[in-house]
Amino acid sequence: MTDGPDSRPYPDPAGAGGEPVVGAPPAPQWAPPAPEQRAEVPGQPGFAPPSAPPRPASSGRTVGIAVAAGLLAGLVGGVGGAALVSVFDSGGPLTTGRLDTLPQSSPDAPPLQEGSVAAIAETALPTVVSLTVSGSNGQGTGSGFVLRDDGYILTNNHVISGSVDGGRIVVTFSDGSEMKGTVVGRSESYDLGVVKVDKRGLESAPLGNSAAVRVGDPVVAIGSPLGLNGTVTTGIISALQRPVTAGGEGEQSFISALQTDAAINPGNSGGPLLDAEGKVIGINSAIATVAGATRTEAGSIGLGFAIPINTAKRISEEIIANGKSETPIIGVTLDNRYSGPGAKVRDVTAGGPSDGKLQSGQIITSVDGNEVADATEAIVAIRAKAPGNEVTLGLENGEEVTVTLGVAPD
C-alpha cells in the first residue's frame, strides 16, 4: 500500500517540462501539375495521381487548375504573402454550390439534474483547494477543502508535513486566487492536518456521516491529481473498514478506510470524497499500486482509500481547538514479528489502560466482536475509537476483556 495520492515533496512529473512544444510540420514541396493534367474540383486540387486520366468535374465541364509560381516559393520559404491560386475553365470562373449546415443542438446546457455528478461538482468545486507545498525536501502539490467559512482547511498530514521548519504553503482556490496558508496542527497518527488562510466568508463543504455509508453507494472524488486542479472522478464505495497504513517519510498512520474505485492519483490527497448528496464522507489519502511500480509510475488502478469523515471531524475539531489531537491507546506494545492470526501482546504499560487486564504473550483476536488478523488491524480498530471509549478485546483462549481507552503521550 502506498500513500499514492499525496504530493509529498518530489518533482511533479506534470510540471517538469511544461507544455509539450508542438512544432510546425515541414512545408510540403511539390510542383504545379503539368498543363495537360486535370484534377477533380472536389477534394484537394493538384494532388490527383499522374496516372489518373482526366475526369469531368461535377459541373460536367473540363476544369484545369493552375498554381501560381509564388506558391512553391512561399511553401519552401515558410514566410511571405498568401499563395495565389487561379481556378478557371472554358466557361469562366467556377462557382461553388450552396453550403448546407448540419443540424446541431442549442449551445445552452440542459438544466442540472438534482443528484447528478454535474450538480454535485458545480456545488462542491468552489469548496475544494489545491495546496502547493515547498520545503527543504523540494516541492509538491496536494488537495484540501474548506472546513469552515473563517479560513480553516482540512487536508492530509503528508501533504503539508514538508512545510515544517521554514517551508511554505500556497492555497489556490477554484477561482484561481492564491493565499498563503499556515499550519494550525497535524496528526501523524491519523494522517490529517489543518491549514488556515486569512480570509472569511469562504464557502465551506457540508459534512456527511461515514457511519451511514454502504458498499455500492455512488461517490465523487475531487482534487488536483498531478497538479490538475478541480479534477472530478466518480465511482462507488468498494468496501468499508479497510485497514490501511499511510503517511509521509518517517510518519505512519493507521486508517480504517473507505475503499473506492473512483480514480485517485498522486495529488488527490486531502481532497474530499463526496456522497450522492454532495456531502463529504471521506478524505482521499492513499492508493494501492502494482507491486514493483516506482513512485513515478504510481497511478489509479481502482483501489483508492479515504479516511472516514467521522474520524476526520473529531481530529480536526481537536486541532482547531488545541493545535493537536488525541490518539486512543489500550496501553500495550504489540509484537510485529508475530505471524498471526491475531495480535500478540509483547509488553503491557505499567499504569496504562490494560494494566492488570492483559498480559505479555496473550493473543488479541477481536475488537468489539470484529476479528483482527494481525497487529495492524488491531491498531486500526482501536484508533477508529476515541479516548474514553470502552472496547471489548477478545482473546485467543476465549476470554473477553473490557478496556477504557487512554491517550497516547505527545
Image (cartoon, grey):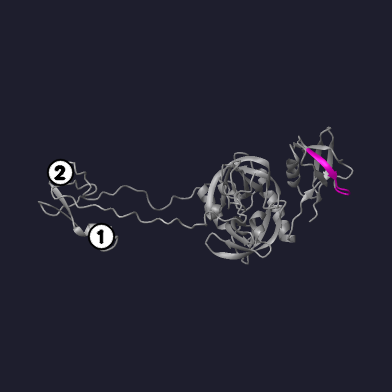
Mark 1 or mark 2, whichever is nearer to me:
1
**Is residue 229 found left or right of 168 in the rendered image?**
left
Q: Examine the residues drawn in magenta and state their main secondary structure.
A: strand
* Residue 349 shown in magenta: yes
**Is residue 148 found left or right of 65 in the rendered image?**
right
Residue 167: quadrant of the picture: bottom right
Residue 2 percent coordinates (x, y): 64, 46
x 49%, y 57%: residue:
17
CA gap between label 1 and label 2 equals 30 Å
Residue 133: quadrant of the picture: bottom right
**Is residue 1 found left or right of 109 in the rendered image?**
right
Q: Residue furthest left?
A: 90
x 50%, y 47%: residue:
113
Camera-nearest residue between 396 and 120? 396
Q: Secondary structure at mark 2?
A: loop
Residue located beneath label 2 in the image: 56
Check disc 2 and give the amino acid type: Pro
Camera-nearest residue between 127 and 350? 350
**Is residue 40 found left or right of 235 in the rendered image?**
left
* Residue 229 shown in magenta: no
N-terminal label among 1 and 2: 2
Range of magenta residues = 343-352
Residue located beneath label 1 in the image: 74
Could you tell me which quadrant the N terminus lies in?
Answer: top right
Q: Residues within 10 Å of mark 1 (few under 14, many from 20)?
A: some
Check disc 1 and give the amino acid type: Gly
Q: Residue furthest bottom?
A: 198
Residue 223 percent coordinates (x, y): 57, 53
Residue 150 percent coordinates (x, y): 64, 63
Q: Residue furthest top?
A: 397
The answer to whether residue 374 is seen in the rendering is: yes
Tell whether label 2 touches label 1 (CB within 8 Å). Answer: no
